[in-house]
Image: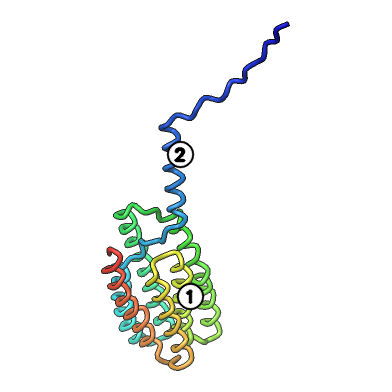
Amino acid sequence: MLKLHRVDQSPEPTALGDRATEDLRFIRQTMEHGAAFTAVPGWGGVGMGVTALAAAMLASGQPTAEGWLLVWILEAVLAVAIGAVAIHRKARRAHLPVLSGAGRKFFLSFLPPALAGVVLTVVLWQAGAESLLPGVWLLLYGAAVVTAGTFSVKIVPVMGICFMVLGVFALLAMPGARDLSMAVGFGGLQIVFGVTIARRHGG
């Protein structure tokens, strides 16, 4: 007696075009997660440094501590705006994602030290220890750049280390030279490394 065996139908083979699209998507996601964030702005950093030099001159002439702090708060807001615009433009030119992959890791690594700096600013100001603020700002900005720089080109964490060293020096050796340390760090260092990044990594 003949027995009829049911032949299982295999699923339809994946279309070649769909398979290629999936492969390209996987490769792109892998590159985004593993590549360095190269949209750190060089000329934008120079712009931040120039405004910091101007702020140091303006702050040094303020008759009150409140006026001094206001100058540097406004400079911080301006520097963030310059940096954000410069990063956006550089990333757009290079067709790089800013809020995904290495870009997302860069910003998430930068935020904790930066937020710690905001908190310590309030605490030190309320304690009447505003002379320590420049050293703290330089130290924590450097820490933020170092941690974020692990997802960027090699020169970025080097810049962060220089800021940290200057911050320690400002805290231990020259706490009274508030605007000088700020000018050297947020002005001089930012300009030097900004020019270097712009020349080596495309603007």
Disc 1 packing (10 Å; few <14; some 14–19; many ≥20): many
Residue found 36% across the figure and 54% down from its top: 96
Q: Is residue 8 above or below residue 121?
A: above
Residue found 73% across the figure and 6% down from its top: 1
- Residue 174 place in picture, x, y as percent: 43, 92
Judging by the rendered image, the residue that carries numbered circle 1 is 143
- Real-space Cα separation, disc 2 to disc 1, in angstroms: 39 Å
* Foreground disc of the pair 2, 1: 2
Residue found 67% across the figure and 11% down from its top: 4
| Element class at badge 1 | helix
Disc 2 packing (10 Å; few <14; some 14–19; many ≥20): few
- Residue 180 place in picture, x, y as percent: 36, 87
| Extreme-right residue of the structure | 1
Quarter in which the C terminus is drawn? bottom left
**Who is closer to the viewer here, 177 or 197?**
197
Q: Which mark is residue 22?
A: 2
**Who is closer to the viewer here, 81 or 60?**
81
